[in-house]
Structures are given as C-alpha cells and as structure tokens.
Image: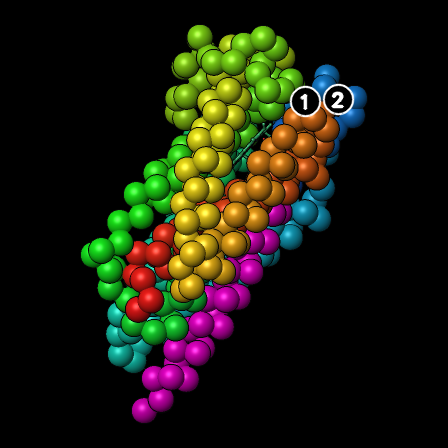
C-alpha cells in the first residue's frame, strides 16, 4: 500500500502543472481571440472584426497548434488528477476541486467546437470566463493537498471582501462581453465614451446569447454601454476589493495573499487604462486578459485565507 503522503505530493505536482497549463491556455487563447478580433491587424481600425465577415485574419497556424497541444495535455492531466484522487481510496479534500476542474475542461472542450464561429457571443463569453475558473480550480486543487480543508471561522464574515469579489465577477462579465462582441473600438476615449459617462441606451448588448454579424464600431450604443459598465464596475472593484485587501494586510495569515491581490488589482486597472490609451494594442489587451484571471484566483484565495482565520 502506497504511503498517503506520497500520493498527495503527486496530486500536488499534477495540480501545479495544471495551474501553469491553465495560465498558458488563457494566454494563448486570449492571443488567438484578440488577434483574430483584429487588435493586431493592419490597417487599424478598418481591419477590426474582419473575422466576422469571413475576411482574412492573421491567425497563425503555430499558435493554434500550440493551443490545441496545451489544452489537450491539460485535459489528459485533468483525468490523471481525478483518477489519483479516487483510486485506490478516495481522497476527499482534493477530489472536489479536481472533479470540478475536469468537468469545466470537458465543458470548454465542447464550447471550443462552437467558438470556431465568431458570431456566437456566448461561445466567446464562456471561453473568457471559463479561463478564469480554470485557474481558480487548479489552484484550489493545489491547496487541497496541503492539508484538510480548514473550517471557516464563524466570527469572520469579511463583508467588504465579499462585495469586492462580487464586483470583480461583474467586471469580468462586462469585460468578457466586450471581448466576445468585438466591441473594443466602440469607446476609445477616457474616462467616458465621448461626453457620456453612464449608458442611456444599448442595454441589449448585455445579452450573451446574441448572434452578431458585424463588429461594434466607434459610437455604437451597445458597445459604449459595455465599456462604461466595465469601467464603473472596475472602479467599484478597486474601492471594495482594495479596501478588503488593505484590511487583510493587518492579518498575519492573510498578508501575503492580500499583497498579491493589491498588486494584481492595480496592475489590472493600469493595463485596462493603457489598453485604451494605447489604441487597443494586442500585447496590452492580452496582458489585461491574463491578469484578470490571476486577480480572480488571487481574490478568491484571499477570501479563503480571511475566512478560515489562522487555522
Ligand atoms: C478589476 C478590473 C478589471 C477587470 C477584472 C477587467 C477584465 C476584463 C476582461 C476579462 C476582459 C476581456 C478580455 C478578453 O477579451 O480576452 C476585458 C476587456 C477590456 N477591458 Fe477590462 N478589466 C478591468 C478593468 C478595466 C479598466 C479600468 C479599463 C479601462 C478604463 C478596461 C478596459 C478594457 C478594454 C478596452 C477591454 C477590451 C479589450 C479586450 O477585448 O481585451 N478594463 N477586461
């Protein structure tokens, strides 16, 4: 009979490998999506969203193959991870995040079949949000091997942190809608879209089930509404999550996690602002997309640290 410690170590290494692969999948798929959307095309902005008209777009075959290889490797490792959690005896702690991770990977594999058609907003939307969840669940699987899941300390409610993470989720949703609707150039100014600071119309752009035929260009009401909602929710995230993390700096067992959240939060906002100021450069937008997933995983990790106290 194998020593349980050795098995847990193996699961931890697998989960760590999956965390690294998840980051790579997010990076490569953001590059493919945003490059295909036209953020790296010439002449900009005329070429933006050409992918929707079936026109030429600069997808490199090499990057697509890399994406397939990395995603397939992650899927295989996901199966091995779950198998290791179930056999020969059930390991309860890592089983839950590992099976959720595998389930999500299978879902994203099916969504991938549909995302070949860029007109389906929902496919791009699920891909972007699914990437952030991949990172969260693989990191959770790593943590689950470090000891039994600690019980939440009932004295710790962390309401500001909860509100901050709720706002972050909303910001992610609005950002994912901008990406999935090819709405980047709808609002190239800061702080508002021209003189407009709050959306008056264009609310139908919030529908992730829509089908789009053409990219949303400058001044489009729906695209501008998404940008404005994205920015306002980012400001609310900065205030709430920033405050929650600043408070958590006082807790010795949460200090490191709080520091990571603060750095990722400031970096994420700066990347968003620079993406707009830089005229939607591909590099900035890809970095903005990857950092969003890191921030989400770091924020959820901080919440867990704060809720369980020093346990
Ligand atoms: C907590 C803060 C923020 C989060 C979590 C966040 C998240 C996201 C996400 C997930 C996307 C979709 C990326 C993709 O298509 O792959 C996005 C897109 C975008 N965000 Fe943010 N964002 C934040 C703040 C901001 C700010 C402050 C600005 C600018 C003022 C901004 C500007 C943009 C722009 C222009 C896009 C479209 C470019 C693209 O498709 O990537 N974001 N954001």
Q: Main secondary structure of the magenta part?
A: helix
Given contact means CB atoms under 8 Å apart, are the residues at marks 1 and 2 in contact? yes
Q: Above or below — where is 88 with respect to 107?
A: below
Instruction: Give the residue at mark 1.
Output: 48
Q: Where residue 260 sits in the image (x, y, percent)?
A: 53, 54
Quadrant where the N terminus lies?
A: bottom left
Q: Above or below — where is 87 with respect to 67?
A: below
Instruction: Give the residue at mark 2.
Output: 44
Examine the rendering and report whether any part of residue 62 can be seen: yes
Q: Marks 1 and 2, Cα distance to the nearest angstrom?
A: 6 Å
Q: Secondary structure at mark 2?
A: loop
Instruction: Pick whichever, 284 or 165, lies toward us.
Output: 165
Tell me if 283 is positioned left or right of 265 in this view: right
Q: Where residue 257 sits in the image (x, y, percent)?
A: 47, 57
State whether label 1 is within 8 Å of ligand 1: no
- Looking at the rendering, the stretch of residues picked out in magenta corresponds to 1-30
Q: Where residue 43 sits in the image (x, y, percent)?
A: 79, 21
Q: Above or below — where is 290 with respect to 43?
A: below
Pointer 1: residues within 10 angstroms few (<14), some, or many (20+)? many
| Residue 13 is inside the magenta segment | yes
Residue located at (51% from left, 20% from top): 228
Q: Quadrant of residue 166?
A: top left
Tell me if 123 is positioned left or right of 49 in this view: left
Q: Quadrant of ligand 1?
A: top right
Residue located at (61% from left, 10% from top): 194
Tell me if 231 is positioned left or right of 60 in this view: left
Q: Secondary structure at mark 1?
A: loop
Examine the rendering and report whether any part of residue 113 can be seen: no
Residue located at (55% from left, 58% from top): 21
Residue located at (57% from left, 36% from top): 269
């Amino acid at each position: 009979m194998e020593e349980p410690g050795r098995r847990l170590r193996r699961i931890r290494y697998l989960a760590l490998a999956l965390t690294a692969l998840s980051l790579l999948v997010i990076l490569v798929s953001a590059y493919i999506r945003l490059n295909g959307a036209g953020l790296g095309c010439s002449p900009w902005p005329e070429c933006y969203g050409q992918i929707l008209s079936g026109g030429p777009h600069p997808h490199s075959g090499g990057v697509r193959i890399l994406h397939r290889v990395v995603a397939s490797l992650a899927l295989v490792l996901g199966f091995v991870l779950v198998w290791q959690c179930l056999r020969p005896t059930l390991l309860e702690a890592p089983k839950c995040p590992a099976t959720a991770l595998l389930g999500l990977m299978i879902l994203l594999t099916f969504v991938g079949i549909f995302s070949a058609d860029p007109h389906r907003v929902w496919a791009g939307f699920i891909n972007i949000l699914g990437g952030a969840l991949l990172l969260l669940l693989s990191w959770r699987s790593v943590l689950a091997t470090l000891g039994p899941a600690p019980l939440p300390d009932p004295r710790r409610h962390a309401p500001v942190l909860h509100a901050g993470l709720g706002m972050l989720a909303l910001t992610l949703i609005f950002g994912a809608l901008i990406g999935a609707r090819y709405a980047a150039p709808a609002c190239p100014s800061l702080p508002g879209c021209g003189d407009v600071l709050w959306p008056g119309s264009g609310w139908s752009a919030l529908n992730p089930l829509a089908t789009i035929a053409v990219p949303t260009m400058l001044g489009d009401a729906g695209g501008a509404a998404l940008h404005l909602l994205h920015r306002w929710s980012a400001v609310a995230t900065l205030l709430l999550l920033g405050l929650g993390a600043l408070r958590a700096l006082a807790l010795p067992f949460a200090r490191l996690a709080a520091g990571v959240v603060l750095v990722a939060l400031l970096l994420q906002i700066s990347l968003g602002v620079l993406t707009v100021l830089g005229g939607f450069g591909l590099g900035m937008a890809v970095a903005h997309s990857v950092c969003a997933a890191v921030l989400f995983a770091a924020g959820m990790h901080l919440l867990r640290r704060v809720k369980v106290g020093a346990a």
